[in-house]
Image (spheres, rainbow, N blue to C red):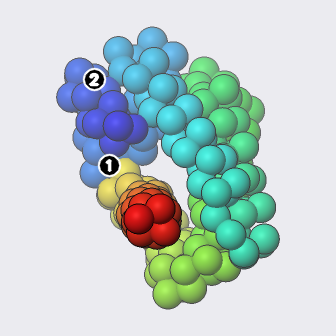
Amino acid sequence: MAAVLVLIAGAITPGYDPVARSVSWLAVPGKPGATMVEVAIALIVCTLLAFALSITGGRVGRVALVIAACALAATAVIRLDPASILTSSIHRLASGLAMISFTVALLALARPLGYASLALIAVGVALAATSFSAWGLWERVLLGLPLLWIVWRSAKMAVSADATTRASNASLSSAAT
């Protein structure tokens, strides 16, 4: 749902280029899709917190997910502001903390994806000194990695819980017979 909201916000924002511009740019005060982006971030924050509470093991990963959720919440509250260098800098720091926390969570809970995330961060650092202009795309890949993993892992947990419930019900039914 969050991805759909961001896509709609991008579509209704004149001149928005998702390859060049970050999602945060859509939430700049006065942009037509700002509220949609804030709702999308809120959905992700709630999902991260619920996921962190529902997974077993991996205390470091769970804590990192909670930190990522809090940092993302901060990015929604402290939005990019072209009129304020300080506000935009704080927003970017919170965004960076979220990305680092996502990477730590992946390293703790899904090591190969954590390595991929580390590689993307390293590439981003190297590209910062160049004329690279596809930061929106880079951001989407970096954020998409842990978010898609969470969707996949949550679906897997739901299927597993459903199978356990069916097996338990079948066992009870068999015992009653």
- For mark 1, what is the residue? 20
Q: Mark 1: which amino acid?
A: Ala
Query: Mark 2 packing: few (<14 Cα in 10 Å), some, or many (20+)?
Result: some
Q: Is residue 154 above or below residue 91?
A: below
Which residue is painted at 60% across and 21% down in the image? 83
Where in the figure is residue 159, as x and y percent of width and height?
39, 63
Q: Is residue 9 above or below residue 107?
A: above
Mark closer to the chain start, 2 or 1: 2
Residue 65 placement, left or right of 17: right
Q: Mark 2: which amino acid?
A: Thr
Quarter of the N terminus within the rendering: top left
Which residue is painted at 55% across and 32% down in the image? 42
Where in the figure is residue 110, as x and y percent of width and height?
55, 80
Instruction: Using the rendered view, name the quadrant where residue 80 is placed.
Output: top right
* Whether residue 157 is visible: no
Give 140 or 86, whichever is nearer the viewer: 140
Query: Mark 1 packing: few (<14 Cα in 10 Å), some, or many (20+)?
Result: some
Q: CA distance from mark 2 to mark 1?
A: 14 Å
Where in the figure is residue 94, as x and y percent of width and height?
69, 46
Q: Secondary structure at mark 1?
A: loop
- For mark 2, what is the residue? 13
Q: Which mark is residue 36?
A: none
Where in the figure is residue 82, as x and y percent of width and height?
55, 26
Which residue is painted at 72% across and 75% down in the image? 58
Give 127 or 9, whichever is nearer the viewer: 9
Q: Does the residue at mark 2 contact the one at mark 1 (Cβ under 8 Å)?
A: no
Residue 6 placement, left or right of 72: left
